[in-house]
Each structure stands twice: as C-alpha cells, then as structure tokens.
Image (spheres, rainbow, N blue to C red):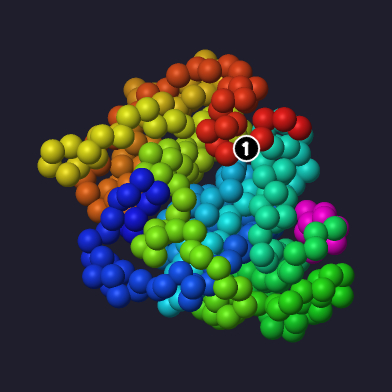
Amino acid sequence: MGKMSDGQESADIVEDILELQVPVEKQKCGFIALLGAPNAGKSTMLNAMVGTKVSIVTQKAQTTRAQIRGVVTRGDTQIVFIDTPGVFAPKRRLDRAMVKSAWTGAGDADFVALLIDADHGVTPEVDRLLSGLAKNNNPRLLVLNKIDKVRREDLLALAAEVNKRLDFEQTFMVSALKGSGLEDFIKWTVAHVLPGPWHFPPDQLTDLTLALTAAEVTREKIFLRVHEEIPYNITVETEQFKVQKDGSYRISQVIYVTREGHKKIILGKGGQSIKAIGAASRRDLSEMFDTKVHLFLFVKVRQNWTDDPGRYREMGLDFHD
C-alpha cells in the first residue's frame, strides 16, 4: 500500500516517486466530490481509481460515515477524490451528520460528480440529490455506474433525462466494479483542474492514518458478517497500533455496541463470530500493509456513543444538527 498520512511508505514505488517531483509552480490540483445515493458505487469507484482499498465496501446502505479522500497523482496533476456518505432521508442524529457531511463535501469541491446506479435509474433518493444539486453552484459531472447491467438505449435515455433536469459539464458511463470507463473520467479531471500546489506527497493515497484504516476494515467485516441493524449501531476504535521489531504490526481494537444483546451477537456462540471477523480483517490488513498483522479485538458496550460529541469528532462528523 502507498504512503498513508502517518508516513508509511511502499518500497516498491519509492524510486518512481523520486522521478515524479514537480516544481510547485508547475503543479495542478483539484478536489472532486463523489456524491450519490447509498450503494451507488462511490466507494468501489474510489478504490478502483486509487488502486487500493481506502474506503470500505458492503452491500448494506450507509456504510460510509464520513468523507474519505483518495489521491491520484498523474504527472504534474493531483486529483483528490472525496468519497462522501450516501444521501438518504435521515432519521437519527448520526444519519443527519452523515448527510450533512456529504453536502459539505460537495460544497467544498472544485467539481461534484453525481453517481447514479444506472440499473435503478432516477429513484426518490436520486431525485432528492438532483434537487439539492440545483442549489449548488460548483461545476457538476454525471457518472452513470453499473452500465454492464443496462442496455445501451436505456443508458442513453437515462443520461438524457438527468441532463434535462440539470446542467452537467460532462457525462461518463462506467462500471466501477469492472474498471471500465474510469480512465476516461480520471483523464478528464486531470485535464480540467486549475493550477495549484499539491495537498499530499505524490506517493500518498489517502488522508486516513493506518490506525483509522484498520478500524474501517474491521467495521467492514462486521457489516459483511452481521445481518441485522446492529452494524449501524457499532463503531470501531483502534486503541493501539504498534510496529514490532520484526516489522509486523500489533493492532488492538475495541468494537463498541449500544446494547448487551448486540455484544453477544458480535461475539457469537463460543466466540465464533468475533473470530471470523478478526480473521477476515487480519487477512485484508496484512495484504494492504504488506506485513504480518497481529490483530486483537474486544467488544464493549457503550450505550450512548451515538450521542457523544467526541465520537463524532473522531469520525470527522459534525455533532450538531
């Protein structure tokens, strides 16, 4: 994995990076917010463009809770793609904070890329997004995702329908899962961002620290393992991230749940569930960090963590409505 925000480096690209140094006066940099309904494919698209997992992916809606930045550096240009939470009708404080984070990301970006699941078309969530984007003055891009599931004539009709609702600088048709169409999207953004200094070193792929990345990966495995509402009421915190003498990582994490009953489900009969979650997370982290990972998971009850301003700050969310 490339360099993360705490200085971790990937040795196999260091030599190439030295050749990529570009004088500040010749640098270009831009921020592209990926906005969409839950499960539109934003995280999958971000990971594919960056070339490694920086944002977790599950089939459950509302997996991404805060803005996650993935960095792509091409020649003299750096593009910072912002994966935002899916926009939906919020019911709880956490929901409202997630939706607010998505719109904040859109407001701060140079371009807003609206991702639409082409197989679902203009759903009520997409309709809500189009109404919200009408109030946003930033240049907009339309990205129709999952095109491998839709006939060409239906894709063209959907593109025409959405472009009739709002003005978009460009329309792209992609399959984030298969990688098709993404290179055209990256090349367009590289060609259209303005001169400006890079915000990250050329070998940095995300703004997440290793500790936060590790916590997100474990949270992903919980989403994939536990099939109820429980994942929406958990948070994962990395309490210790230590580099051992042999280069391996020792990581201790706490999974916080809101009820004692939820703790029992996360643990599973005889600890089977927590063991499976740990094994899956350890496997992914070892591959991502390119070193052996010793992962220790603990489950604790924290009844009111969704009403704790400190937890929101750690997730990069605004506690206030």
With 261 as the anchor, is 154 left or right in this view? right
With 127 as the anchor, is 206 left or right in this view? left
Residue sitting nearer the eye, 157 or 293: 293
Where disc 1 sits, the SS reads loop
Residue found at x 46% / y 32% = 236
Q: Position of residue 92 (x, y in %)?
A: 73, 31
- Residues in magenta, as a range: 122-134
Residue, far left: 246
Name the chief secondary structure element in magenta.
helix
Q: Is residue 67 above or below residue 260?
A: below
Q: Position of residue 44 (x, y in %)?
A: 52, 60
Residue sitting nearer the eye, 222 or 252: 252
Q: Which residue is mark 1?
A: 317
Can residue 69 be seen by looking at this rendering?
Answer: yes
Residue found at x 43% / y 77% = 75
Residue found at x 40% / y 49% = 5
Q: Is residue 143 above or below residue 1?
A: below
With 158 as the anchor, is 43 left or right in this view? left
Asked which quadrant contains residue 50, the reply is bottom left
Q: Position of residue 186 (x, y in %)?
A: 54, 75
Q: Quadrant of the N terminus?
A: bottom left
Residue 128 included in the magenta stretch of the image: yes
- Badge 1: few (under 14), some or many (20 or more) residues near its Cα, within 10 Å? many
Residue 6 included in the magenta stretch of the image: no
Q: Quadrant of the C terminus?
A: top right
The amino acid type, in three-letter code, at marker 1 is Leu
Q: Position of residue 162 (x, y in %)?
A: 81, 71
